[in-house]
């Protein structure tokens, strides 16, 4: 999701999504903010490109004992459906510090050349990424996430969130680090009949037009409600939560 937004590569940016179909009204019953963290999260995002319908993302996050699994499926709308479904999966362990991925995969349609995967060797602090059958390695730092797991890691961060947050994330092709600042005032986002109070994460000021922003639902365990990505050419990809269920 953190790469430049370009026509056929837009699907590669949709790693920030959340999950499966439930009636919008159930979101009002899903806020478990005074209880334990959910063991299952299901949600749906609608995605627009420059304000026009682009895709839907169905995703679910599940915990079984100390193990977690994320599955995210993106289906394009209209001509974008020709790219085929984009499927992200992440599996690993839940620790006191949050999610600790072990394996990540990205598949785009039936094209094996677009498939990537990443294996996390925490004992050796080594990240192994496989792209088109070729192995690429990088040092693995504590807290590193993948495109499917990172959205759920916010649930496990100490609250209130710090003013500055560092996100270390692998796309399966490379390992990146992103800095975010939290705006001081909460923002309310209305979507599908539900009002979400959010904390807005923005990148530091920079010379480039490219930007990536997140709005996290403070009453819903900091699940991302909205994700905005703009590339250097002004192409805008906006992803908004429309359905949510927590158990």
Image (cartoon, rainbow, N blue to C red):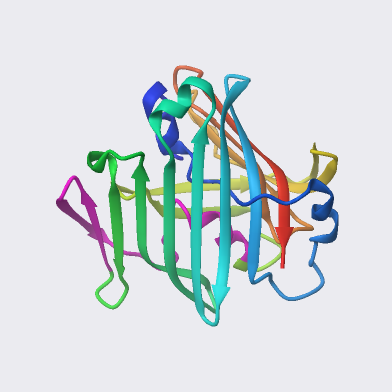
Q: Is residue 166 left or right of residue 38?
A: left
User: Considering depth in this image, is 44 or 17 the residue closer to the camera?
Assistant: 44
Q: Residue at x 28, y 40 (%)?
A: 114
Span shown in magenta: 126-155
Q: Quadrant of the C terminus?
A: bottom right
Q: Is residue 207 visible?
A: no
Above or below — where is 154 with respect to 202? Answer: below
Going 22% across and 40% down the picture, which residue do you hit? 113
Could you say where residue 211 lies in the image, as x and y percent from the top left? Answer: 52, 31
Splitting the image into 4 quarters, where does residue 86 fall?
top left
Q: Is residue 2 left or right of residue 220?
A: left
**Residue 13 locus on image (x, y percent):** 45, 37
Total marks shown come to 0
Above/below status of 129 relative to 238: below
In magenta segment, residue 237: no
Residue 239, how many percent across, how many down?
Answer: 61, 36
Q: Is residue 205 above or below residue 24?
A: above
Check if residue 150 falls in the magenta segment. yes
**Residue in front for this viewpoint, 121 or 130:** 130
Q: Residue at x 53, y 74 (%)?
A: 97
Residue at left 50%, top 23%?
209
Q: Say if residue 95 shows up in the picture.
A: yes
Left or right, 47 with respect to 107, comes to right
Picture quadrant where residue 52 is located: top right
| Residue furthest bottom as drawn | 65
- Compared across the picture, whether 188 is left or right of 62 comes to right
């Amino acid at each position: 999701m953190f790469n430049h937004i370009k026509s056929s590569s837009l699907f590669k940016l949709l790693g920030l999504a959340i999950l499966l179909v439930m009636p919008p009204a159930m979101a009002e019953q899903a806020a478990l903010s005074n209880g334990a963290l959910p063991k299952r999260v299901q949600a749906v995002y609608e995605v627009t490109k420059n304000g026009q319908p682009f895709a839907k993302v169905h995703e679910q996050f599940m915990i079984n004992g100390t193990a977690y699994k994320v599955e995210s499926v993106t289906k394009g709308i209209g001509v974008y459906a020709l790219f085929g479904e984009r499927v992200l999966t992440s599996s690993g362990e839940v620790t006191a510090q949050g999610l600790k991925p072990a394996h990540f995969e990205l598949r785009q349609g039936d094209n094996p050349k677009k498939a990537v995967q990443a294996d996390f060797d925490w004992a050796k602090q080594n990240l192994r990424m496989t792209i088109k059958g070729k192995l690429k390695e990088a040092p693995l730092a504590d807290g590193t996430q993948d495109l499917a797991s990172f959205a759920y890691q916010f649930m496990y961060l100490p609250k209130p969130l710090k003013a500055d947050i560092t996100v270390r994330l692998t796309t399966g092709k490379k390992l990146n680090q992103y800095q975010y600042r939290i705006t001081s005032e909460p923002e309310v986002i209305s979507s599908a009949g539900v009002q979400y109070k959010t904390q807005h994460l923005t990148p530091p000021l920079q010379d480039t037009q490219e930007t990536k922003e997140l709005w996290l639902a403070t009453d819903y365990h900091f699940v991302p409600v909205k994700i905005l990505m703009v590339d250097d050419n002004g192409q805008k990809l906006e992803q908004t939560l429309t359905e949510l269920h927590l158990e």
